Amino acid sequence: MRTRIFRVVALVAVGLAVAGLVRGQTVTLAWDASASTNVAGYRVYWGTNSRAYCCVTNAGLALTQGVVLPHSGRWFFAATAYDTNGLESDFSGEVSWESRPAPPVMAGKTWVRLTPVFGRSTNLASWGSVTGEATWFPATNRAEFFRVNRLLMERVMVP
């Protein structure tokens, strides 16, 4: 069996296309064409962990693709090329982008944005961080003070 090597040069652009949705922002990605002559199409992969993608879409022969992100946070993207036999290239270079909630639209007022960042570990030796959703408060004074009185943690199973 002969292995065909494709090369997706780079995932070169990540930009916010539509930001007005509470959940589900659309990001448009673009990449350079593969130098291989027998490319049948491209796939775009994305997820919240580097090189561990949860989602994929087939872009066909297009060199841009919009994807809908289900929630805000840091997202990682890569592309591959494939041929008519289904052989797929290695991932392109990875790009990341942080989707953030839009601030409230209140002309002439100052707002404070609080965003929780939590440490997470499954073995107490290796830790990662998880950023939660931002909360907005109108700034009423020159100095604002906040403290965490309690943190509610609950395990939820979705049927």
Image: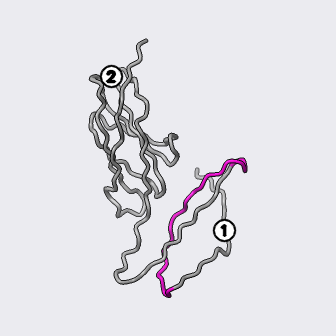
First in sequence: mark 2 vs mark 1: 2
Q: Residues within 10 Å of mark 2 (few under 14, many from 20)?
A: few
Relative horizontal placement of residue 153, taking residue 69 as reference (left or right): right
Q: Amino acid at mark 2?
A: Thr
Mark 1 highlights which residue? 151
* Residue 110 x, y percent position in the rendering: 42, 81
Q: Quadrant of the N terminus?
A: top left
Task: Pick the residue in front: 68 or 143.
Answer: 143
Figure check: 103 above or below 64:
below
Q: Tell me residue 22's x, y (percent).
A: 41, 64
Q: Which residues are magenta?
A: 122-142
Who's the residue at 65% across and 54% down the image?
120
Label ID, residue 111: none
Magenta-span inclusion, residue 124: yes
Reading the image, the residue beneath label 2 is: 84
Tell me residue 155's x, y (percent). Answer: 66, 57
Residue found at the far top of this picture: 1
The residue at 33%/53% (across/down) is 15
Total marks placed: 2
The residue nearer to you, when weighing 95 against 118, is 95
Q: Residue furthest right?
A: 124
Quarter of image, res 78: top left
- Identified at 40% across, 67% down, the residue is 102
